[in-house]
Amino acid sequence: MSGEKYVAEVELTSTICAACGVAFAMPSHMEAELRRTHSGFYCPSGHSLSFTAKSGDEKLREELETAKRRIQDFEAERDRRREQTAKARDARRRKLRAVS
């Protein structure tokens, strides 16, 4: 049957084109996906846009990776110092044995 009507509720998020300043809206789930993927899209006037800012998840992932690298660096430095200390201790012991 033609002329059927239906009602749907869609949550929209508004944004403004950085090129021409026109305000427009898109479904919120679409906006979230575009921010996550940094994919391109167009304003109603045809300007190519994309969300280039890092998302909260991306920032947290980077912070986690940085923290992991720092831990690895600290552990490597700790191990290096332990090895130096052990070598110095062994050298002192050998020297003391040679003197006695």
Image (tube, rainbow, N blue to C red):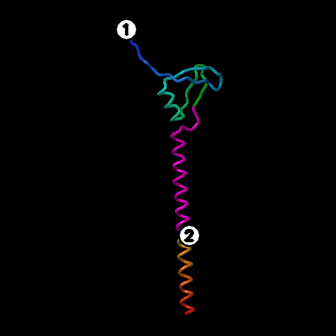
Residue 57 drawn at (x, y percent): 51, 40
**Circle 2 residue:** 81
Q: Quadrant of residue 4?
A: top left
Q: CA distance from mark 1 to mark 2?
A: 78 Å
Which of the two discs, 1 and 2, labels the residue nearer the N terminus? 1
- Based on the picture, tell me whether residue 62 belongs to the magenta stretch: yes
The residue shown at (39%, 6%) is: 3
Residue 43 drawn at (x, y percent): 58, 22
Q: Main secondary structure of the magenta part?
A: helix
Which amino acid type is marked by label 1? Glu
What secondary structure is marked by label 2?
helix
The magenta stretch spans which residues? 51-79
The residue shown at (54%, 34%) is: 38
- Based on the picture, tell me whether residue 55 belongs to the magenta stretch: yes
Q: Does 19 sit above or below residue 71? A: above
How crowded is the residue under tag 1: few (<14 C-alpha within 10 Å), some, or many (20+)? few
Residue 30 drawn at (x, y percent): 49, 27
The residue shown at (53%, 71%) is: 82
Q: Residue furthest bottom?
A: 100
Which amino acid type is marked by label 2? Arg
**Circle 1 residue:** 4
What secondary structure is marked by label 1?
loop
